[in-house]
Amino acid sequence: LGVLQEFFGRLGMSGLKFKPTYNPYTEPSLEVHAWHEGLQRIVEVGNSGVFRPEMLRPMGFDDDVSVIAWGLSLERPTMIRYKLNNIRDLFGHKVNVGMVKNNPICRLGYE
């Protein structure tokens, strides 16, 4: 959880909430939620868990090996970081190309 807090913290998010959830490929699993100022509500920003052994066997791993799965849903943190209210501002034919050119791809709090 500390790594997730640090990662999302560098994107300007604090007060993260973690919620147990079900994913067919990980157990245990959890969702990561953060406050979205533009939407004025909490949104899911990521998902994680520990891969189930049957997911790892085809790759040759023994059942006693643990592998963390991180689904960081980078669209939502990007929306929060740049105060976007609509995911279509990031994807599709209506993207503002000027906004893409004028903003660094991944600052993570570094200038």
Image: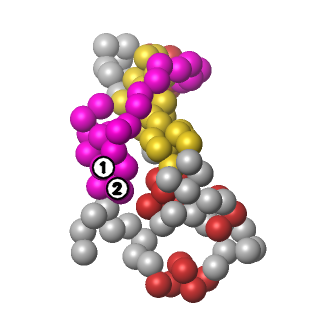
Label 1's element? helix
> Which residue is identified by label 2?
12
From what the image shows, is residue 23 above or below residue 84? above
Residue sitting at x 31%, y 62%? 108
Q: Mark 1 and mark 2 in contact (Cβ < 8 Å)?
A: yes
Closest to the observer: 27 or 33?
33
Closest to the observer: 18 or 51?
18
Which amino acid, by three-letter code, is at mark 1?
Gly
Q: What's drawn in magenta, residue-wise? A: 1-25
Q: Residue furthest front?
A: 40
Residue sitting at x 69%, y 63%? 88
Which amino acid, by three-letter code, is at mark 2?
Gly
Label 2's element? loop
Residue 14 % position (x, y)? 33, 45
Residue 111 % position (x, y)? 25, 75
Q: Residue furthest top?
A: 64
Determine if the magenta segment contains residue 15: yes
Residue sitting at x 30%, y 40%? 5
Determine if the magenta segment contains residue 67: no
Residue sitting at x 29%, y 31%? 1
Residue 32 % position (x, y)? 45, 35
In this rendering, position of residue 26 left or right of residue 14: right
Closest to the observer: 34 or 72?
34
> Which residue is identified by label 1?
9
